[in-house]
Amino acid sequence: MMASTRSALEIAHDAHDDLGGAQIVLSKIESLMHAVLTEKTMNAHVRNLVDIAWNLACEAANTTDRAYGEIGRALDALAPQNAQSENVARESEVKP
């Protein structure tokens, strides 16, 4: 059995994609917690716990957003910057 050899850049791109997935999930959890906080019949203890969860979700979502952007920019900076790669990118775009 042969193991495929992946470059560090390929691994980094995959990790960036995974981080993007986590970013989406955290955003959904943040929205869910916010929606739960609008419930008027919730007792105070539960409301405090949900508020803590919402704040943690917000903090994690913000951290993930920031990291996703920083890593994306770093990966873009590593991409080859020559006329040929730009032409290939342009030619591969989906046209309406």
Image: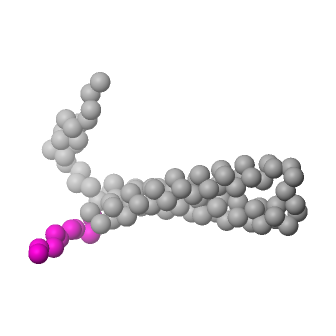
* 58 relative position to 3: left or right: right
Q: How is the image coloured?
A: one colour
Residue 34 forms part of the magenta stretch: no
Query: Number of numbered discs present?
Result: 0
In the rendered image, the residue lying farthest to the top is 96
Report whether 60 appears left or right of 79: right
Q: Is residue 88 visible?
A: yes
Residue at 74% of width from left, 66% of height from top?
Answer: 52
Question: What residue span does the magenta drawing correspond to?
Answer: 1-9
Residue 79: percent from the left, percent from the top?
A: 27, 55
Regarding residue 68, the answer to whether it shows in the image is: no
Residue 24 percent coordinates (x, y): 52, 53
Residue placed most toward the observer, 72 or 4:
4
Q: Quadrant of the C terminus?
A: top left
Q: Nearer the viewer, residue 79 or 67?
A: 67
Q: Quadrant of residue 86?
A: top left
Percent position of residue 36, x then y: 74, 52
13 over 81 or under it: above or below:
below
Left or right side of 39 for 70: left
The N terminus: image quadrant: bottom left
Residue 41 versus residue 4: which sits nearer the camera?
Answer: 41
Residue at point 26% right, 63% down? Answer: 10
Residue 6 in the magenta stretch? The answer is yes
Rendered residue at 77%/61% (across/down) = 51
Q: Residue 61: which quarter of the image?
A: bottom right
| Residue at 45%, 61% in the rendered image | 19
Q: Which SS does the magenta portion mostly show?
A: loop
